[in-house]
Amino acid sequence: MSDEFTLGRRLPELVETMVESYERHPNCRHIDRAYLPAKRAVEELIQRLLELVYPGFFGRQDLTQHNVSYHVGELLPRIGYLANQQIFKSICYMNEIEGKDDDDACRKHAGGVAEEFLANLVAIRKKLDGDVQAAFEGDPAAVNCDEVILAYPGLLAVSVHRFAHVLYKLGVPLMARILSEWAHRKTGIDIHPGARIGGNFFIDHGTGVVIGETTDIGDGVKIYQGVTLGALSFPKDERGRLIRGYKRHPTVEDNVTLYANAIILGGDTVIGRDSVIGGSVFVTSSVPPYSTVTIKPPELKIKDRPQEPGSTAALPDYHI
Amino acid sequence: MSDEFTLGRRLPELVETMVESYERHPNCRHIDRAYLPAKRAVEELIQRLLELVYPGFFGRQDLTQHNVSYHVGELLPRIGYLANQQIFKSICYMNEIEGKDDDDACRKHAGGVAEEFLANLVAIRKKLDGDVQAAFEGDPAAVNCDEVILAYPGLLAVSVHRFAHVLYKLGVPLMARILSEWAHRKTGIDIHPGARIGGNFFIDHGTGVVIGETTDIGDGVKIYQGVTLGALSFPKDERGRLIRGYKRHPTVEDNVTLYANAIILGGDTVIGRDSVIGGSVFVTSSVPPYSTVTIKPPELKIKDRPQEPGSTAALPDYHI
Amino acid sequence: MSDEFTLGRRLPELVETMVESYERHPNCRHIDRAYLPAKRAVEELIQRLLELVYPGFFGRQDLTQHNVSYHVGELLPRIGYLANQQIFKSICYMNEIEGKDDDDACRKHAGGVAEEFLANLVAIRKKLDGDVQAAFEGDPAAVNCDEVILAYPGLLAVSVHRFAHVLYKLGVPLMARILSEWAHRKTGIDIHPGARIGGNFFIDHGTGVVIGETTDIGDGVKIYQGVTLGALSFPKDERGRLIRGYKRHPTVEDNVTLYANAIILGGDTVIGRDSVIGGSVFVTSSVPPYSTVTIKPPELKIKDRPQEPGSTAALPDYHI
């Protein structure tokens, strides 16, 4: 085997040039700085939150009415500990950027945010119950709600989003983003933690869905794979830098359905309530309530194509 | 550090409100119920199955004609054990829903299904050999079949589908769905375990592909990333509930090619044999055999756009 | 429980038929052959490379100017060891196919390639610094460069591509492909290691992006989710086999932006510099520099649709 490969005396030079590169490109290093939230701890936090809101579906299987309180009594302090720890890191990190460095103030602030977060969990669970129901009612392939919780990636993404959105509103956006990206990695569904999403929300299949930061979604909305709710263009300030933080993603009103690969763009674009946007439709301006928007069916054209090697029979050929 | 965060005397109240929430939203809990199939065990099962059907590519690397029988002799009982255990859970779970609870009958039923599953593995392997060959013959970027097995997500998704489909037909759909979702998570390819797929099937790249439960796919079909084989609309019964279980996804005949992001919808939609559906084409009605369906090429329009800041030269602008 | 399931006396027969299947379908086995590169080791290599190029963002968090050299001094030999080991396997594997089997020559060759790879890391890091900057400048949702490095899947995919592309050019394409597929699995972004990508490259969201082997991308290019840079058709030789290795994917010049789900196909297709290709646009021929190509806006049509159960008011209906 090739185990004997060593850098030998070239090691010091390689180390030196790499460390020099750290100095030359300081954006790509995080040295002598407050700690960032740790992905691994955030992942455990997500796992524990799922165990808490969907008991018996994630984690322990042997739950009964007799032992369930003990289970929750063990789970909640662990969630509190993990949440507080990563919120603390997020806040210290932001404080450092703003030039503050009062460790005690940061700890106190983090504790308050963590408490707020925990206090939101019952309300989140209530919303998730509506999402599970919407998935079951919206998909003829769903056998029952158990299958939805156990195996629907859309529900996983929405569940994590509801946690992330609370963290975003509580002022820890970087940590919220790490939660969102975890869900994106697992499901292919990319929901920015800033997006506001109403009740009974259902994403089916979901791969490729993108929901931007300033999107507003009403109640009872249904979205299929590949749908984008995005920005139309990015205005810049007088120094040529992107302007950040304004409303640039669409508003989707109650009971709208967006079929596969539909693209809806722009902060002024409103999809009126009870509308249906068909597959692959591209929309950059508002649509009135109760509308149906679809692609024109393909026109039929005939052209020659050999049916078998050698043959040249006239064959149907469609152009859209 | 912030390690000292504790819930203190608020813990009992937090536990209580959460447990109350379990009672208020019983769909989102699985308590006092038969166990669900366990994702982690299903994942190990998939891993072992891949080691079995692609020996030397997954798992152990040191296989020779002399030791390979011992390897298989170790692998098969483990696969049998894992399959039987999770099938048992799936069947007990379904029996409980139907009000049956004869543990012995369930164990016997599970054992029979597990045996059937094992008996199918050689036939599955034969099909996969055709899929590997189809991938190599269908992609000029493939160097050889080894690369296809080692690194093609499409083959991974199809391999897992062939296992899941057998489980689906043997009457354990929830377990089958957990296999499918594992593959979806790894590859972005979402094939419902109910879909029927012929031989020599090739999905290239694959992210975003969705193949619905009642889809029928012939032999020698080739599918690219982002393709949807979906339902057109969902009829409801007189009480407003979705009707489940009828044919609602397309039929794709032999030797059809579906290019990137094509969307084919509807249970009556048949893509006739040897047809080619171009990229981004949206089809909701049948296409005759030997057809080519493509999007119209974009029309050229000219509009002003500044070539450099300040300039206002006439510039080409295309509209489709 | 069902733990007692055993294959019993059927085991020998099951083993035998499976081993026979290995002989019948030799493409799907890798027995009595040189080892393939091992996915797990390649994954650790990727992890260590990310720790090296983004210190403090991946792996250890406690880095300071005082300890960073020791960190790098520990990391580099591990990277060297892992890279050399897997490069060695890749080269032995290729040599075996070509009928060579000089283990010493292979080891020497591998050592040289590993050294070359290590010598490229500082240059890769410089390119990645430009990519981070491009992401921050291109996305109004990005708070700062830290967020980009920590949570942007596009940057992860591009980072792994820059490592994989160097390995591809150094003659270990199979290993390069394993790196690429790792990134594809994590991000939904499928970049073939052969693709040539200029500086300051930014992929936003990214799920569903496919960039083919012979694609050429200039500097400052920006790509959104679902974009395909693909081949138009695959010519075959006189024996009906695919011709491999020729230029079949597009060229994208400097400062081009490709919006969501755009599909650009063909080896002769050139997207001229500073052009903008709108969402869902399908292009199979060249586009002049400074062009804007968009889909036509939908035409408005009115059709009846009941606004409420029972009502039959005229309602807007769009067709594209």
Image: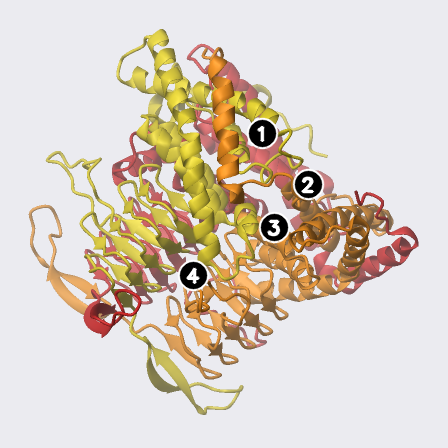
Chain colours: A orange, B red, C yellow
- Rounded to the nearest angstrom, the CA distance separating label 1 from label 4 is 33 Å
Numbered label tally: 4
Q: What residue do we see at 69% from left, 30% from top?
A: C3
Tell me how far mark 4 sits from mark 3, CA to CA.
40 Å
Q: Which residue in the protein does label 1 denote?
A: B80
Q: Secondary structure at mark 4?
A: loop
Amino acid at circle 4: Lys
Q: Which mark is residue A178?
A: 3
Output the chain of dot 3: A
Would you name the residue on which mark 4 appears? B247
At numbered mark 2, what does the secondary structure look like: helix, strand or loop?
A: helix
Relative side of A226 to A317, left or right: right
Q: Chain of mark 4?
A: B
Q: What residue would you read off at disc 2?
A: B105
Contact? badges 1 and 4 (CB < 8 Å): no
**Horizontal and vertical percent position of residue A68:** 83, 50
Along the line of sight, the residue nearer the viewer: B114 or B176: B176
Q: Which image quarter holds the N terminus of chain B?
A: top right
Q: Position of residue A117 (x, y in %)?
A: 75, 58
* Mark in front: 4 vs 2: 4
On screen, residue C108 above or below B237: above
